[in-house]
Structure formats: C-alpha cells, structure tokens
Image: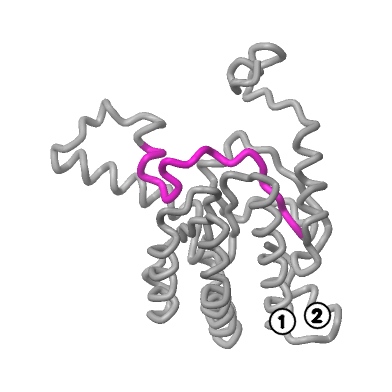
Amino acid sequence: MDGNGRWAERRGLPRLEGHRRGARSVDAVVTAARELGLEVLTLFAFSSENWGRPPDEVAGLMELLATYLNQERRRLVDNGIRLNPIGDLVRLPGPVRAMLDEVVAESADRDEMVLNVALSYGGREEIVRAARALAGEVAAGRLDADAIDEAAFTARLFTAGQPDPDLVIRTSGEQRLSNFLLWQIAYAEIYVTRTLWPDFRRRHLVRALQAFAGRERRYGLIGESAQKASGHG
C-alpha cells in the first residue's frame, strides 16, 4: 500500500494525513475484495524496515492501526472476514497487540475471506524464521533433515495453510517487491499501477483483476502443460 507520504506531500499536508487517507482505501478495498469473492487478501501495512522512520510517524501509524481495528472489528466479523496478522508482532506496542488479539479471537470462526495484515513484516525475516524452526526440529530429533521439502518449509511460514498469492498489486508506480512474501509469490502475477494508495478504490481493484484474468500463467511450462499444472486444463 505505497504512496501515502507522496500523496500528502503533493498537497502540502503532513505525511500522517496521507496515512489517514490511506486507511479509507483499506476500508474500500477490503469491502470490495469480500464482495468480489476473493478468498485471501493480504495488505502490507508496516514493514520491518518501517521501524526506521521518524518516531512520530511510527507512533501515528500505530495509533491509526489501533483506531482501524477498534472501528472495523464488528464489520469484519459480520462480513465473515477472519483477521490474520503476520510478522514480528512482538515488536508492536502492547495496546496494539492486545487489540489484534481481541479481533483475531472474535473473527476466528469466520470463513468467507481471510484478511492477512502484514505488520512489522519482512519476507527475508520470515524465511529465516522458518529455516530456524526447521533446524530446531531437526536438532530436537522431531524431524529428519531428509524430510525437509517445499511443503515442510511452507508449513513454517506465517501463511501456512493458505494458497500462494495469485496476484501482487503494487501501487504508486513502484516496480520492486520490497521484501514482501518472497517465498509465496514465486509464481504470482504482478500488476503495477501509478495510482497512489490513498486514491486506490474498488474500480482500481477491479481493473487489476481484469488484467490478471487476461494473463496466461505458465509456471515455467508451456501451453497445455501449464493449464494442467494450474488445475485449469
């Protein structure tokens, strides 16, 4: 969800105002994703690198997160959305973690859509965490090293049990992955839009999905073989 700061700067506003406007886009996109039938939506809200931003901006972002959770918790539950925060959550302020725990518990049995919110998240860090977990299990004698394969590794990620992402939407025109779900998006399609996140709405999501629907996904194969591999042949 990139472009909040630039959106504010272009209007002579504080960066935090861009983040506030970006929260409206979160509402719009989550609602649209649920109505359009998406099974899983992941929002990259705060990266592990973002802790290096000015303290007042970080504090403002944490406050916005707490406000969003408090305001939207009932709507998430009523719309069948299960909240699943991913990342190094222990670094988050205590009140934010407590609020996350409450909403996670309240939405635990919802099954219409999973909403992953990546907080204090980094793709490389997640991979290291999974490798460390596997190494610990091998050292403890609970796992044979020869049994480690892609499935075993995937099961130790924050997104264990979920399908790999089909589509990555990158707002504000940036053309980089920014340490996002590096393992999971190996074969995801990437859609780049110059729209800044505070301006991103349902129509932009639909446009991205339409572009995705027109692509041929080959998974390193060709033609009919790729269709069979993806389950659409």
Q: Quadrant of residue 72?
A: bottom right
The quarter of the picture where the N terminus appears is bottom right
**Can you give x and y, in whole percent of width and height, for residue 163 in the image?**
51, 38
Do the CB atoms of the residues marked 2 and 1 lie less than 8 Å apart? yes
Side of 154 where 8 appears, left or right: right
Q: Residues within 10 Å of mark 1 (few under 14, many from 20)?
A: some
Q: Alpha carbon of mark 2 to alpha carbon of mark 1: how far? A: 7 Å
Q: Residue at x 75, y 58 (%)?
A: 171
Residue numbers of the magenta segment = 153-171
Query: Which residue is labeled 1 in the image?
Result: 15
**Can you give x and y, in whole percent of width and height, for residue 112 in the image?**
54, 48
Q: Residues within 10 Å of mark 2 (few under 14, many from 20)?
A: some
Question: Height in image: 187 above or below 61?
Answer: above
**Can you give x and y, in whole percent of width and height, for residue 46 in the image?**
56, 67
The disc labelled 2 sits on which kind of residue?
A: Glu
Circle 2 SS class: helix
Q: Quadrant of residue 227?
A: top right
Q: Quadrant of residue 21?
A: bottom right
Question: Which numbered circle lies on residue 9?
Answer: 2
Circle 1 SS class: helix
Q: Residue furthest front?
A: 78
Q: Earlier in the sequence, mark 2 or mark 1?
A: 2
